[in-house]
Amino acid sequence: MISANCWVPRGFASEFPEKYELDDEEIERINQMAQLQLEDAQQDLEDATEENADSDAPSKAAEASKALKSQVDIDDDLKEYDFEHYDDDEKDEEGQKVSFIPGLSTARFVQEDEGADPYLSLPTDVDQNEDKRDLQIYPTDNLILSGRTEDDVSYLDVYVYDDGAGAPEGAEEDDKDKLDPDVENGMVRESNLYVHHDLMLPSFPLCTEWLNFRPNGTNDNNNIGNFAAIGTFDPQIEIWNLDSIDRAFPDAILGDHSTLDGSLLKKNKKKGKKSAHVTTHHTDAILSLSHNKAHRAVLASSSADKTVKLWDLTTCVAARSMNTIHNGKSVSSIQWHPNLTQAGAGSILLSGGYDSTVAISDVRISNESDMVKRWTVNPGEEVENVRWGDQSNDNIFYAGTDAGVIYGFDIRNEGKKPLWKLQAHDSGISSLEVNQYVPGMLVTSGMGDKYVKLWKVPVESIDKSTIKPSMILSRDLGVGNVLSTSFAGDIEVAGHLVAGGVTGPLKIWDAFSNKTVRKSFREPLKDLQTLAREQANNNGRASRIARKYNKDSNEQMFEADVRENEDKEDEEDGGDEEEQDDDEMEDDE
């Protein structure tokens, strides 16, 4: 099950991620964290013992004493066999007996000079270089973060996506396009998706956000990092370094470390009392995260504890906590304003909650009642997702509810009715995504169905309430009920959508590879390709998206092959399935 995902822009990942090694300082930090959890466990045990104490406690103690005495008698009978030293190897002056290999019980091995073992071979420089190349990430690669759960164990999978290089057959090229430094002249490198490494998470992942800021660092332009923030059913937010492999613990934890096992959450639910406003940390599941790109030291989080918190990443503490934005209801989704050029936009936070409202807050204002503007959806509906419009239309924002309805609002019309609303799905909206590079491209998915729907919002007539989005296509991506989707944030892969669901692997769908999509967004795609070519030429490169699509392009969908060994039969079955999917796509078109 894949419940959360997001993209990492190109150029931020380290080319050669380091393999993590424990040092004394890290061991001490881990010991302290383990001690906190041990103390919590001991306290829970004491509480449970007190609650379960009853009148027949003396009789239970007597039975336990009797059982213990019986066990001691059995142990006395086994003493003569000396089982405690059964696995110990005999030693003598000549060396150590190799008694664990049948037939070699009398063999000896000797230690060579400087403690070297002749039976062990250390990795050579060639081996180390091969391992290094296997982990290499190129500047043209994208990373994809994916929260996955299998058999009650949760992970953060870090994928590498290489969009390829070179021009497909029949592509239109100019002279500069042919000087592609990423591939030899006339050659094409196909796209590739694979899992680079993974991280184990403490609980079921609900949201993930990429950070380009190193936590506990200085708040300046030189502090550039490659980190992932993950929200789960636990009340803490974990921050992991994506440029480090084999880490056992996160680099930073936002929240109360004494509740790492969720004990405080369990106690609060058990008491059933209305808790006071906790300003220092969350006390329930983390539902949404949003990193402020204008003020990179700020991370916003929303929770089932009905609060929105702003975290100072230089100190990893909560700088502000707001509990009245959504009238004492859970806050399901948040997003900072995406416009980095407009003055003051970096302080505007969009949020949706279970109080049937969408709110826009200016966090520069200290009084919560003065900082919030609200819009309402149908009574009784709970807002599940909110998103700002694309770069060309950032006065518009969208909301999706648990009734499967999508709403379009205008920030300039406070408190008024939505510009439009539509019944997008029969079940609650599980994801709502806006393509920042393609005006009017909107994607939705429902919690109870297997389809991703792509819509075209009429940008030029957005002020007319009679105009509604039109559905371009509905596609089953093969991930079961869809739980999460995300558009790529780089212009070279602007049409790529990643999706995860209840079943199946992570999928990447190139929306522009579909003829119907290209036809519906013909002019926006041309503008996008022109802009991509200009940016690439300014950087001395060739744009792939500028020459990637032509009338003969076929629909493309990618998935990572997580199986290390496949027999021929599995490969043939997979090929048949792909052919069937292609046929279905052609029929749909």
Image (cartoon, rainbow, N blue to C red):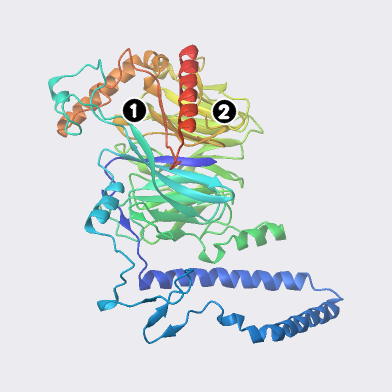
**Residue 492 position (above or below residue 38):** above
Image quarter (top left, top right, bottom left or bottom right) of the N terminus:
top right
> Do callouts 2 and 1 mark residues in contact (Cβ within 8 Å)?
no
Q: Residue 468 versus residue 140: which sits nearer the camera?
A: 140
Disc 2 crowd, CA 10 A, few/some/many (<14, 14-19, 20+): many
Task: Work out whether residue 446 or residue 200 is closer to the camera in this orientation and state it.
Answer: 200
Q: Is residue 403 left or right of residue 206?
A: right
Q: Nearer the viewer, residue 371 or 154?
A: 154
Q: Secondary structure at mark 1?
A: loop
Residue drawn at 30 percent across, 39 percent down = 141
Q: Earlier in the sequence, mark 2 or mark 1?
A: 1
Give the label on residue 437, or none: 1
Mark 1: give few (<14), some (14-19) or many (20+) Cα within 10 Å.
many
Whole-percent x, y for residue 251 in the image: 40, 60
Three-letter residue code for mark 1: Tyr
Task: Give the vertical position of 171 relative to 392 (above or below).
Answer: above
